[in-house]
Image (cartoon, coloured by chain):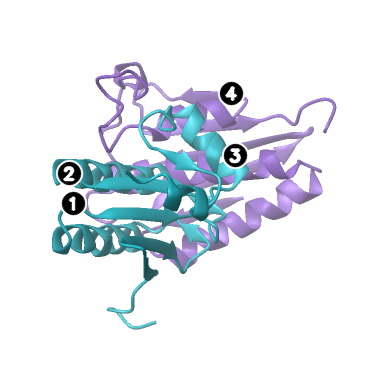
Chain colours: A purple, B cyan
Amino acid sequence: MRFDVTQDRSRIDLVHARIAEHVASMGIAESGAFGIRLAIEEALANALKHGSPKGQPVHVDVDASDDVLTIAVEDHGPGFDPASVPDPTTPENLSKPCGRGLLLIRTYMSEVRFNDTGNRIEMVYRPPADRG
Amino acid sequence: MGANESRLRVTHQEGVTKVEFVDRNILDEANIQSIGEEISGIVDRNPGCKIIISFHNVDHLSSAALGTLITINNKVRNQNGQLRLAEIDPQIYEVFMITKLNKLFEIHDTSDQALSSFN
């Protein structure tokens, strides 16, 4: 399932709604759903801010199979090196207003991958075995 | 919704300004910018203000919203004011812990506790 997303909030909300259907059907707990929604929001915000300089749509691919939810967000920007993103939790960075999105994505998702260019992020969520 | 319609509810009690959010989700970039400008305006008009931002109505917020809160916190501190956060949903509080912003902000369980915490 693929979506093209712009700054149009209604379109972003539609993506959230469709993914929420998968989340519900997979029996993912509320805490997991909260984190997935936040991760999507952060990935889209990064892509729309840095990877859509001319307002081009950002692509969102969603796959739910074998009890694994995979969401990919790809933009038209030059990409970035995720290893170069500073730790926003260090004392010198704590009061800076930006740079927390990737930390939140990595925290809430089971696995996070980037393509070589750094303009496509794949976020994988595997529900905990106990489903608590 | 009109373009200039406030997304905040602002009340005053015992010399303290309390700000609450109209929206349950603080995610939209334009909305976040508008909220930040409105709260910054309150701070600018009341140097040295005591302000509580309550999240009792909020279900989701993004790192962009956190960034706006940090900017507001910096502004309040620069003007010798005091900022408290209160009534944060446990899932959102976890976001503050992950980002360690629970160390940057003074956070209280209730607005009453925040109110009584001011010097």
Report the chain holding disc 3. Answer: A
In the rendered image, residues at marks 4 and 1 fall on the same chain: no
Disc 3 packing (10 Å; few <14; some 14–19; many ≥20): many
Q: Residue furthest bottom?
A: B2
Q: Position of residue A9 (x, y in %)?
A: 43, 64
Residue under pointer 4: A111
Q: Secondary structure at mark 4?
A: strand
Q: How many marks?
A: 4
Residue under pointer 1: B48
Residue under pointer 2: B80
Q: Is residue A88 visible?
A: yes
Report the chain holding disc 4. Answer: A
Q: Are marks 4 and 1 in contact (CB under 8 Å)?
A: no
Q: Identify which residue, A88 or B79, lies in the foreground.
A: B79
Quadrant occupied by the C terminus of chain A: top right
Query: Could you say which disc has been placed on residue A35 in the image?
Result: 3
**Residue type (three-letter) at the residue carrying disc 1:** Gly
Disc 1 packing (10 Å; few <14; some 14–19; many ≥20): some
CA–CA distance in space, label 2 to label 1: 5 Å
In the rendered image, residues at marks 3 and 1 fall on the same chain: no
- Which dot, 2 or 3, sits closer to the camera? 2
Q: Secondary structure at mark 2?
A: loop
CA–CA distance in space, label 2 to label 4: 43 Å
Q: Is residue A132 left or right of residue A18?
A: right
Q: Identify which residue, A76 or A32, lies in the foreground.
A: A32
